[in-house]
Structures are given as structure tokens and as C-alpha cells.
Image (cartoon, rainbow, N blue to C red):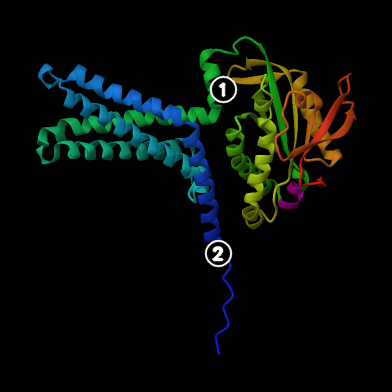
Amino acid sequence: MSEAPRPARPPDRQSEERDRAAFLMHAAVGTYARRHAAFLLGLLVAAFAIGVGYRFLFDPVEARQLANYLRSGTHGVVLMLAGWMARLFLIALPHSSFGPLLRRLPLAAELAAKVVVMTLVLTIVAVGFQFILYGPSLSPDWFSHHLPLIVTVSLSFSLIVGVAFEIQRLVGGRTLANFVLGAYHRPVREHRIVMFLDLAGSTALAEQLGELRVHDIVTRFFFDIDRPIADYDGQVHAYVGDEVIVTWPLSGDPKRNALCLRCFFAIEERVAQLAEFYRRDFGLVPQFRGSLHAGTVVVSECGDAKRQIALFGDTMNVAARICEYCKTSGELLLVSADLLSDCTIPEGLKTVFNGTIQLRGRRAAIDVLAVRRRDREVVCA
């Protein structure tokens, strides 16, 4: 008589956490590598040129031979690849099982840890490649003079790169570039697409779970949706309470303008993929709604002690009011007819006229449409 099969053991918490971490790590690293492939190619070419230039400037004339130039250029390429791999590792780290611990560290401690990792990688690769090229012929003088120089250069490079990336994370890459270049030192009118994404029911959740617990949900949600926003070229303008404001340039290409629509449903997919982890950690899956509108905004630097780039104008007000209207309409995503006239509706989505609404503080009424998946007829509030 055969033995009855044993029921499968449900995955434990650690196994689920590893699965979630692996999913987020692969998504983050894969997307970053694909988006920056051309940038990496440029870095490798620059690294080869720097290696050749170093040999030309600092070696004696008799050492300026083709073989030496090729070795130096290759050395530069290998070091750049090592730095790139270390960068990918550091990008993946916040999405790993160490992510919560890393995010609890003060910025200075997080920066120090990343600088140490980058320095170790560059130093080990530089020394290892030196052994491959020259083997046992390395003299004690190399260890006493050249090795400290390699460590110093690796540490300096790692610190500069680490500080630059942390500033970019705090301010935003495009915002940082605009500050440095003074693009918005004087007010500038731009055509932008604006999305308001609002976490639904956060006030009720705060009463039910407590403010600190809801804060954990909101920060996890913002962290998890960051990658879909970046994947579809969105720029986070601000986090305001339980709301995030994302913008895109309004172009003459309807397919490019439709990235904002694809972004919203990519966020929906990401949250659905992580639903079990939300239920396990918080007992619920965050629900959200969004609005999209396009038009002219005034972009300008403001503030002194704390400077930021602010967006002003009717476009921002309309997008915010449409997001408020979502609460009573029962739709997940409402989009102004003005924006949809400049978009190609992506395959798998459909629009449903929701009505003409009079927004508070605005004379002219505005037509809004719900955007839904074709396979979903009913959208819950």
C-alpha cells in the first residue's frame, strides 16, 4: 500500500522575503543595466583612453611601446568594469534582504559602507590584474609605493562617486543637473504631463493601524513603485504625505506621451506582484488612484536655506482636482481629454467618458475620461 503524499509545506517568512528580494533585485539591476548600456560603452572607451594617456604622460620614453599602451588601456577598461559591477551591486543592495537594515542607517553610515565596498573591489581588481600581467616579477618597491597609491586613488574615486550618487538620490538626477546648469534660475514655461498618485484610505488606515504603521506602508509603497516610474521615464517631482507627483515632458510624439498611461498600469502590476508580501507584512494591499493632465507649467527655483524646483500653474491645480474627483467617481485613473488628445492609447487599454466636471476654483469645465484595462469592466473605488 503506497504512502499518502505529504502536504507541501507552506513557504516560511524567510523564504518569502528572499523571493521578494530576488524579484526586486533582478528588476532593478536589469533595468539599470539596459538603460545605461550606451553610457557604459562610453565609460569603457574613456577608461581605455585614460589608461593610454597615463602611460604616455608618466612612463619614460623607452617604455612607450604599443604593448604597454594596450596593457594600460586594458587595465583601465578592467577597472571601469569592476567599478560598474560594484555599482550594480550597490543598486541591488537596497532591494535585497539587507535593504530594510540599510535604509535604517544614517546617510553617513550608508555612504561609508558603500565607499568601503567600492574601494575594496577596485583595489582587489587592480592588484589582481597587476599579478596577471607581471606575476612574481613584482618587486617589493611596488608594494611599498604603488599599492598605497592604488588604495588612495580607489578610495578617492569611491568617495567622489559615492557622494555624487547620494546627492543624485536626494535631489534627483535631472533636478541636480538643472540646479548645476541654472536652467530654472529664472522662471521658465514648459509643457508637462503631470500625474498625481494618491494612496487611498490612508486616513482610515491611520486610525486603524496607527500613524507609524501607515508610514511604513507609505514608504514601502513609494520604494516599490520607484522602478516602474523610472522605467517609463517619469520624474518624481515631490512626495507629499501619501501622495507622489510625477511629471513627463509633453512632446509632439503621441506614443511617447502615452508613457504616463503605461506607467500607471506598470505600477498596478508591480503592486499586484508584491501583494502577498504586503498582506504578510501589513495585512493589506495598498490601493491607489491617479489623475493625469497636461499643459503649461511655470518651473522655477525657490527658497534659499533649502532650495528646490517648484512647479506652478493651472495644470498643477487641475491635476490635483481631478485626483480628488477620483475619490467619488469610483475610478482608479482619470485623465483629462486635453492630455488624451495628445496620446496614443496603448494596446490593452480603453477609455470611458466619465463626464464634464466643474473643478473648484476654475471657470472652464473639463472633460475627463477613465482609462481602464480592456479585461476589466468594473473598477472598484
Q: Quadrant of the C terminus?
A: top right
Identify residue type, mark 2: Asp
Q: What residue is shown with label 2? A: 12
Kindly identify the residue that appears in the image at 50 percent across and 43 percent down.
94
- Is mark 2 in CB contact (under 8 Å) with mark 1? no
Q: Residues within 10 Å of mark 2 (few under 14, many from 20)?
A: few
Q: Residue furthest top?
A: 186
Segment colored magenta: 205-209
Report the front residue among 13 and 22.
Answer: 22
Taking the magenta stretch, the answer to whether it contains residue 207 is yes
Q: Quadrant of the N terminus?
A: bottom right
User: Viewed as shown, does residue 171 lie left or right of 212?
Assistant: left
Identify residue type, mark 1: Thr
User: Viewed as shown, does residue 181 lie left or right of 288?
Assistant: left
Q: Sequence order check: which comes first, mark 2 or mark 1?
A: 2
User: Viewed as shown, does residue 8 lie left or right of 30?
Assistant: right
Taking the magenta stretch, the answer to whether it contains residue 77 is no
Q: Residues within 10 Å of mark 1 (few under 14, many from 20)?
A: some
- Give the alpha-carbon distance from disc 2 to disc 1, as whole Å: 42 Å
Q: Quadrant of residue 243?
A: top right
Residue 124 picture location, percent across and down: 27, 40
Kindly identify the residue that appears in the image at 71 percent across and 30 percent down.
195
Q: Dot 1 lies on which element?
A: helix
The secondary structure making up most of the magenta span is helix
| Residue 104 seen anywhere in this rendered image of the structure | no
User: Viewed as shown, does residue 136 lie left or right of 46?
Assistant: left
Relative to 364, does residue 381 appear above or below in the rendering? below
Q: Dot 2 lies on which element?
A: loop
Residue 175 picture location, percent across and down: 56, 22
Relative to 301, does residue 324 appear above or below in the rendering? below
Q: Which of the numbered marks, if any, corresponds to residue 175?
A: 1
Relative to 267, does residue 148 appear above or below in the rendering? above
